Image (cartoon, rainbow, N blue to C red):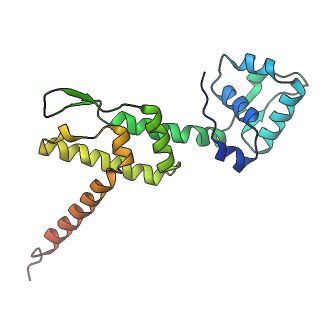
Amino acid sequence: MRIEVDTELLFKYNITPNQFILIYLISNESKILKDFINLVDENELKEDLKVLEKINFIHNLNTNDKLNFSNVVVRDEFLNLVNLKADLFEELLDIYPIKVRRPDGFYDYLKTDSARSRKRYNQLVRGNKLKHRKIINALKYELEIRQKEGSMMYMKRLPKWLSSREWEVFEERIKDEEKEVELTSTYGTNIE
């Protein structure tokens, strides 16, 4: 199992990588939680749980000294922090086209190198839902325009689309279109 550890989150909340992995495995009800627990000293696990409960990431329902991880409830505070970036990229990935037919007649697959794209997108968005929403709206607009114009064949692969910040071009087009609508709807509409 591969777990991405957000070091900014570790520094911000002053938690260790072990604490992060522990709460992550508990939240996903992972099968490897038992293996992880066997690698760490029981007293250290108890201290980790106390720290995580103190910062409101978990609610520990264990009443005695025995550790039972099914009695540990992961709070939304942690779930929102961890799942936010992955969910944002997944939404982008769901909307982005899978393949296009290029002018030479061959299909080109656009969702290449998703690991690099995920990393780049997380760097760009940094968990900012507003920025993510702007990018998604620009992508939807781009797809709509390209389908109308018949230019889907020129759609860039996802890594290139992200590195060239292609959505910014379509954000500008959205703004221009909104200005045109305002101008046409205000001129000559009032009769006196």
Q: Quadrant of the N terminus?
A: top right
Q: Is residue 90 left or right of residue 54?
A: left
Instruction: Tell me where residue 70 sits by quadrant.
Output: top right
Task: Determine the residue positioned at 13% across, 31% down.
Answer: 104
Residue 99: x and y in percent read 26, 29
Instruction: Tell me where residue 183 sits by quadrant.
Output: bottom left
Task: Determine the residue positioned at 70% across, 50% down.
Answer: 12
**Count of numbered labels shown in the rendering:** 0
Q: Taking 152 as reference, is 69 above or below it?
A: above
Q: Quadrant of the C terminus?
A: bottom left
Residue 170: x and y in percent read 27, 54
Considering depth in this image, is 94 or 53 the residue closer to the camera?
94
Specify the farthest residue to the bottom. 192
Instruction: Tell me where residue 66 sits by quadrant.
Output: top right
Residue 19: x and y in percent read 75, 34
Q: Taking 121 as reference, is 114 above or below it?
A: above
Considering depth in this image, is 104 or 59 the residue closer to the camera?
104
Q: Taking 136 as reference, is 87 above or below it?
A: above
Q: Is residue 7 left or right of residue 172?
A: right
Task: Determine the residue positioned at 62% across, 37% down.
Answer: 79
Residue 35: x and y in percent read 74, 16
Task: Determine the residue positioned at 61% across, 29% down.
Answer: 3
Specify the farthest residue to the front. 104
